[in-house]
Each structure stands twice: as structure tokens, then as C-alpha cells.
Image (tube, rainbow, N blue to C red):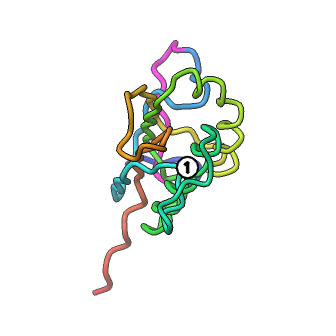
Amino acid sequence: GVSAADGTGVRPLRPEGWAPPRGYADGVVAAGRIVALAGQIGWDPTTQRFASDDFAEQAARALANVVAVLRAAGGEPRHLVRLTWYVTDRDAYVAARPAIGRAYRATIGDHWPAMAVLVVAGLLEPRALVEVEATAVLPPLPPLPG
């Protein structure tokens, strides 16, 4: 089975000889219950309103929303195995990377799943600047008694 030092069953992959990735994993192997999270944008999901048009602030809120959905499944950020970022402006993303990194570490911690960043023409919500879709793998449920 798959094991990791933190007991999550989530382990990063890196082919032999490859340079270490920065801010993501080249791949992840995991065993357990798969949790697929819909893309989360940088708004308040209770009011469906944006507090800001700042790229980094929207990214931070999108990450917080990912973690909130993950926690609803009984998971934690360390269970994330994949994040796909959809951004509407490459230059804004690059400029905001230091602030996004700080928000990432504050929200997700020192855990780096496999990631991809795609630049898109737009998102369904017109004010949305970033959307983050995620997959997590939680440990298997214990067997039922009897």
C-alpha cells in the first residue's frame, strides 16, 4: 500500500534525476477515498459576492473555499493531491505570486500537491479572476464492526 510519514497515504513522486519542483509536486500517489472538489472562486460562498477585485485576495479566498469544502468531507489540506488553477490574466498571476505563496502557506501549509495553471479567456462569474479546482484522497474508512 501507499504510505507517507504523515499517515495520509499521500506521497509525492519525482522521477530520478529530475530537479526538485518549486511550489508543486511532479506527481502524487495516494490510496483511500477520492474527494473531487468543484472549482472555487474568490468570493464569499454564503453571499456569492466578491470582497475585492485584487488578484491575490481572490486567490487567497479561493484557496480558503477549497479547504472549507475539503473539511466538509472530513479532510485536511494535507489530503490534497491535485490543484488546477484557472487564471484570467497571466501577468496578474505572476505579479501576485509572492502574495499567493503567503496565502497558500497560511491556508494549505507546507504541502505541495500536483498542480497545473491554465490561462483562460474568462470564468463563468464575470468578476472572478481565479478559480481553483482540487482533488483530495482521504484515508480509507475503517471497516464496519461485525
The residue carrying mark 1 is: 63
Give the number of callouts. 1
What secondary structure prevails in the magenta region?
Answer: loop
One can see residue 121 in this view: yes
Residue at figure coordinates x 71%, y 40% from the top left: 102
Name the spot of residue 51 as percent of width and height, x first: 61, 54
Please tell me which residue lies in front, 55 or 127: 127
Figure quadrant of the C terminus: bottom left
Find out whether residue 52 is within the magenta segment.
no
Name the spot of residue 14 as percent of width and height, x first: 48, 25
Residue at figure coordinates x 63%, y 40% from the top left: 54
Name the spot of residue 142 as percent of width and height, x first: 38, 72
Residue at figure coordinates x 66%, y 47% from the top left: 109
Please tell me which residue lies in front, 38 or 129: 129
Disc 1, SS: helix
Q: Residue furthest bottom?
A: 146
Reply above or below: 126 against 115: below
Residue at figure coordinates x 42%, y 37% from the top left: 84
Name the amino acid type tagged 1. Leu
Q: Residue furthest front?
A: 126
From the viewer's perspective, is 22 left or right of 38? right
Q: Which region of the structure is painted magenta?
A: 8-18
Reply above or below: 68 against 114: below
* Quarter of image, res 96: top right
* Quarter of image, res 122: top left
From the viewer's perspective, is 11 left or right of 94? left
Reply above or below: 114 against 22: below
Reply above or below: 41 against 123: below
One can see residue 7 in this view: no
